Amino acid sequence: MKKLIMPLLALVCITACVLLMLFGSSENYMLISVIILVLSMLPFFASFESYRPSARELSLLSAMIAIAVVSRAAFYLIPQVKPIAAVVIIGAVCMGEKSGYILGAFSAFISNFIFSQGVWTPFQMVGLGLVGFFAGLIFKKVRVNKWLLSGVGFVLVFAVYGIIADTSTVMFMVTDFNLKSVLAVYGAGVPFSLIFALTTAVCLFLFGEQFIKKIKRINIKYGMFEVCENG
């Protein structure tokens, strides 16, 4: 229960910031976006730091971030067809939920130097980070198979990342906040989230298990990230 206190407090604070942006009088959206980013990252960084990862573990995490960034950049010209979330989920399964969040957040941040940084970046970082976090939690005790892996990947990308990413669009594109306008923006984002989720599911179905087994061998060989028992 103690492990959940910091993430829950951060979630409450993030929710308060989102509500302020939606219904408050302040228009300083960039500042509030940065606050959301910091609040969401701090518990995970603090938890990861207390874990005291080894140099080998940090090297593997850095390599996974690089693979995630390249996987997104390789499909630069095809909107939403990006395997980046699949790489994040695979990394989270093999390295745990804390590393999964950091993997997702940094992958979004670094890859946006290619795709362009903006007010949407903090939301993409939080969204992709939470995809990694929840994937790490789900597969901590559940045995991995390609059907479950692709199904979980689809749901997490469509429901978690999609909603958070579309929330940034709502905040920065809608000038007259009302239920109809907000729902219209979320509705317009559904096809894009659906394509991203389907891409993730297909990549996990085709390559997920094999990728996880290879990383598991590295973990066993060097005694890293003992969370792959169900891989």
Image (cartoon, rainbow, N blue to C red):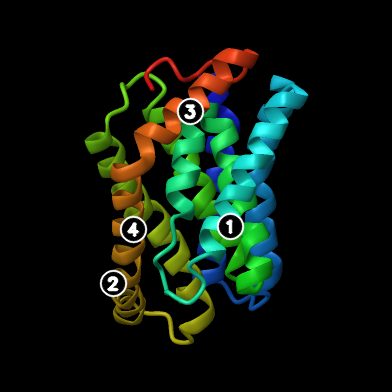
Answer left or right for 76 relative to 149. Answer: right
Under circle 1, the secondary element is helix
Q: Alpha-carbon neighbours of circle 1 within 10 Å: few (<14), some, or many (≥20)?
A: some
In the rendered image, which residue does mark 2 sit on? 191
Amino acid type of the residue tagged 2 in the rendering: Pro
In the rendered image, which residue does mark 3 sit on? 214
In percent of width and height, residue 55 lies at: 77, 25
In 3D space, how far apart are the residues under numbered discs 2 and 4 (Cα atoms)?
Answer: 12 Å
Amino acid type of the residue tagged 3 in the rendering: Lys
Comparing labels 3 and 4, the label whose residue is closer to the camera: 3
Query: Can you say whether 172 is above or below 49 in the image?
Result: below
In the rendered image, which residue does mark 1 sit on? 70
Q: Residue at position x 52%, y 31% from top?
A: 97
In percent of width and height, residue 215 lies at: 52, 28
In percent of width and height, residue 145 lies at: 27, 29
Q: Alpha-carbon neighbours of circle 4 within 10 Å: few (<14), some, or many (≥20)?
A: many
